[in-house]
Image: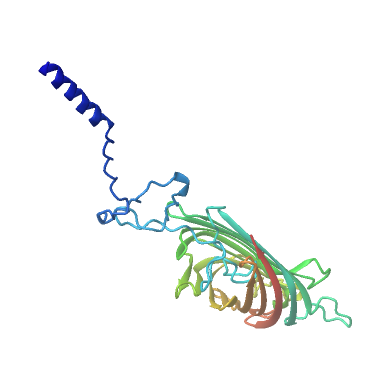
Amino acid sequence: MRALALAAALATALAARAEEPLPLPPPPPPTDVPLPPPPPGMRALPHQPEPLEAIPSRDLSAPDAIGAPRPRPAPAPGGTAGRIGEGPIAPAGAPGAPLQPDESASHWRSSLATGVSGRFGGMQLDTGPNPKENPGVLLYFGAQADGLWTEGIGRAARLRARLFTGGETEVYVPSDGELEAAYMIGRREFRFVLGRAEVGRYPGLGLQALAQVATLPCFEGSLPVLDDSMRVYYYVSPVEAAWVRYYGDAHIAGSPGWASESDVPVAATSARIRWTTLLPPAFLLSLQGDVVKLWSKPDLLMSGEGSLGYQVLERSVVFNVAVRWDSYTRRGLAPSSSVTNGEMKLLGIATLVF
């Protein structure tokens, strides 16, 4: 009986214990406790995982895990504020104003220009009672294409044309101007010119044609100055071949004691320099000079040009006003004589670069 009573009491106690509620589990640890700082060079992890679409892309200009800076993306073709950039610094076709292609888009960059020019002075082409070949207004057409390949030692090429029409007969028939083609190797600041040819025609200076062919030792370069707020372009050809023929009655037919000017090519030296500065907010002032001197001959070509440009449409369009002066000293019709002619042009030109 005592055993039955103990069993009954134990069963009653177990039933009462089963009816009591179980204790609640302990609360989870707080999530706002800051994590220890990451080691140097490592990025801190977020407290909560983020979806992939919410994670921002990494800035390529920020340093990587070992502290080395990432390469910066190439600048826009038009350049940035306070810098000249890669837009045209002079009218398309002007000498000494190369373009800089954006190789991520194309190895070539080109520009076109058109405008009006007024001419003053120079040799009189028609001295009759009703002269028709001395107009004071000419049309301007310019075109230019520059190529660039920076891999390896670097290569560059240039094609350039500048024409003034209407100086002799019809309004659209070219009269003045020049054509140039060049191929170079090296970097932008200093390049060896492996081959260059330029042909010019200037009737107002008494020149039917002036041809120049150059190779080594011939070099050129473009130097940015003061964080590219200024730029200097230079070209030097210590020795080159030049051939000249005079215009109309100025041509020397040749005689036993006085050879024609167009008999054979002769040695010459030429140089060209252009200085450009940025005038905020969007003006460009550019000054350029040329010289070509034939050896052992009185022939000497000297030129100077100044232009003021205004850039619009993200520097893809430039409006220029310019003044150009040219002078040429040539051999006269009599032995040991010389003649000098000079002329001036005022220009208004619009240039589109693409």
Position in image of residue 223 (x %, y %): 46, 70
User: In this rendering, is residue 80 above or below 2?
Assistant: below
Quadrant in the picture for residue 162:
bottom right
User: In this rendering, is residue 226 above or below 193?
Assistant: below
Q: Nearer the viewer, residue 264 or 350?
A: 350
Position in image of residue 173 (x %, y %): 79, 66
Image color mode: rainbow
In this picture, residue 61 sits left or right of residue 195: left
Q: Nearer the viewer, residue 35 or 117?
A: 35
Q: Quadrant of the N terminus?
A: top left
Toward the right, the furthest residue is 130
Q: Is residue 120 visible?
A: yes
Quadrant in the picture for residue 78:
bottom right
Position in image of residue 211 (x %, y %): 63, 65
Position in image of residue 350 (x %, y %): 70, 70
Q: Is residue 207 visible?
A: no
Residue at 43%, 58% (x, y): give it: 72
Toward the left, the furthest residue is 2
Residue at 45%, 72% (x, y): give it: 227
In this picture, residue 339 sits left or right of residue 193: right
Q: Quadrant of the C terminus?
A: bottom right
In this picture, residue 131 sits left or right of residue 237: right
Count of picture labels: 0
Q: Nearer the viewer, residue 215 or 349?
A: 349
